[in-house]
Image (cartoon, grey):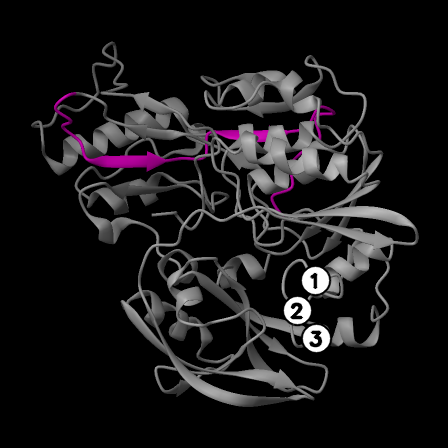
């Protein structure tokens, strides 16, 4: 299952049995297998790795249920750390996207009409196979009309079910037409392809890449796509990261290595800053790419690099983590023209902390924030998101067009050099009231 927020920005499995300081005579001792003993393991692990370890309570209540105990240790600044019990699927984060393969936004149009717009449908997902398409309007969920008032409760109810009945229609001339009922069952969504296009504009060729996420082992795909773009003679590049939650920092580094000119294997890419135990870790492009054992090496990738001076990057409120690293960490090397909406604001990375004993004695798995991330110029601290230079609401013009269509709102803005013909009245008056992939607390930041 793909977790709602991918904390595994660096794929490491940590062999961790206990971090208890044996010199600490006051350290409690609990029977093995008890809730208290598991909580002590959680506390010791967090003391060692957690970015805000110095803010943890000195005397937590070891009697709490494990998940509640974990929450009691978290900093108020932490929006992203979580833990799961690998033997209990109900403890995993749930989202409409990873359960059914689609996402939607509830939007108030310039006319004040409120509509629910399907903005993303994953390829070969349950939603895709049921006939759901980007741009459709959802009028009812399980027979109930969805409104801004009941949106949050409705989204929660969808995640609590294994089948959802949708009434959907098309947006034409300011109204919903051709309504029909479709049924979407809970199921698996396959790995998403990288969509590439080449557009002609003013005598120039512009390459376009829609990248859904950053799984480990994607360098071969990136190398192939950039080889095709280079062979086509593209002079500009549009990166579409608007729904990209992130993933592997190594894959993000590989993407970044393929875009600007002037890079060498020693060019600095990223700085990780942790707690007093983690310290500071600096990695070059080559070092970070090599962290993925399946990756092509830096020099192989650079053979297909486009060598550009600027790049257009399309973002939204759900652009997060490694996708934000792409936006931030390209800036020392080229002009980044960001178009769309402010990103989520996950300027952090981490790895999985778990018990690797054989046989394993603790089934819980911790996904903590371990590092803050910075670019080669030590610029970071974007917990409130990275704001675009060109603020464009993709819902300013309905119906939503397919991703990769040159007339789609954000893409057309990039093709026009970052200008959007409708910026102003409609762009400002269209308001996003709810997004299924962005918790309300994060929309209000």
Answer few, some or many: residues within 10 Å of disc 3's Cα (few below 14, many 20 plus, some between 14 and 19). Answer: many
Identify residue for label 1. Answer: 405
Residue 384: x, y in percent? 63, 48
* Left or right, residue 107 beside residue 353: right
Residue 430's disc is 3
Magenta stretch encompasses residue 43: no
Mark toward the start of the polypeptide (1 vs 3): 1
Residue 223, image quadrant: top right
Determine whether 51 is above or below 132 in the image. Answer: above
**Is residue 252 in view from this perspective?**
yes
* Left or right, residue 72 beside residue 212: left
Q: Residue at x 52, y 24 (%)?
A: 295
Answer few, some or many: residues within 10 Å of disc 2's Cα (few below 14, many 20 plus, some between 14 and 19). Answer: some
Residue 24: x, y in percent? 25, 14
For the residues carrying marks 1 and 3, which lies nearer the camera in this image? Answer: 1
Please report the bounds of the magenta region as a residue range.
Answer: 358-384
Residue 139: x, y in percent? 48, 84
Determine whether 371 is above or below 432 in the image. Answer: above
- Magenta part mainly helix, strand or loop? loop
**Mark 3: which secondary structure?**
loop
The CA span between labels 3 and 2 is: 17 Å
Magenta stretch encompasses residue 370: yes
Identify residue for label 2. Answer: 401
Find the residue positioned furthest to the front: 231
């Amino acid at each position: 299952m793909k977790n709602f927020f991918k904390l595994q920005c660096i794929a490491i499995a940590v062999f961790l049995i206990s971090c208890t300081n044996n010199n600490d005579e006051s350290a409690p001792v609990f029977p093995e297998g008890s809730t208290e003993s598991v909580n002590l393991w959680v506390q010791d692990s967090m003391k060692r790795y957690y970015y805000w370890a110095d803010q943890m309570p000195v005397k937590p209540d070891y009697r709490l249920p494990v998940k509640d105990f974990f929450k009691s240790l978290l900093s108020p600044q932490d929006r992203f750390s979580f833990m799961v019990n690998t033997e209990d699927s109900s403890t995993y984060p749930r989202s409409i996207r990873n359960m059914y393969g689609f996402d939607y936004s509830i939007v108030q149009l310039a006319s004040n009409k409120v509509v629910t717009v399907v903005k993303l449908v994953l390829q070969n997902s349950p939603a895709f196979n049921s006939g759901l398409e980007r741009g459709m309007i959802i009028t009812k969920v399980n027979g109930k009309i969805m409104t801004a008032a009941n949106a949050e409760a409705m989204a929660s109810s969808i995640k609590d079910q294994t089948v959802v009945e949708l009434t959907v229609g098309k947006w034409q001339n300011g109204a919903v037409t051709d309504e029909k009922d479709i049924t979407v069952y809970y199921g698996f969504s396959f790995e998403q392809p990288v969509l590439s296009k080449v557009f002609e504009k003013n005598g120039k060729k512009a390459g376009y890449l829609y990248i859904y996420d950053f799984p480990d082992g994607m360098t071969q795909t990136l190398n192939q796509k950039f080889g095709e773009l280079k062979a086509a003679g593209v002079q500009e590049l549009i990166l579409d990261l608007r729904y990209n939650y992130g993933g592997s920092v190594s894959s993000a580094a590989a993407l970044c290595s393929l875009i600007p000119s002037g890079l060498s294997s020693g060019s600095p890419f990223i700085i990780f800053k942790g707690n007093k135990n983690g310290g500071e870790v600096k990695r070059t492009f080559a070092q970070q790419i090599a962290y993925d054992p399946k990756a092509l090496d830096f020099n192989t990738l650079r053979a297909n690099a486009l060598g550009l001076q600027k790049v257009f990057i399309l973002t939204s409120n759900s652009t997060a983590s490694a996708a934000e690293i792409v936006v931030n960490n390209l800036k020392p090397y080229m002009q980044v023209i960001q178009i769309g909406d402010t990103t989520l604001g996950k300027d952090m990375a981490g790895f999985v902390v778990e018990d690797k004993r054989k046989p394993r004695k603790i089934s819980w798995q911790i996904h903590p924030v371990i590092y803050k991330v910075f670019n080669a110029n030590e610029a970071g601290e974007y917990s409130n998101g990275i704001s675009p230079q060109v603020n464009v609401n993709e819902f300013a013009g309905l119906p939503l067009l397919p991703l990769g269509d040159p007339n789609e709102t954000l893409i057309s803005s990039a093709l026009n050099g970052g200008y959007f013909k409708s910026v102003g009245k409609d762009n400002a008056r269209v308001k996003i009231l709810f997004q299924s992939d962005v918790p309300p607390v994060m929309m209000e930041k």
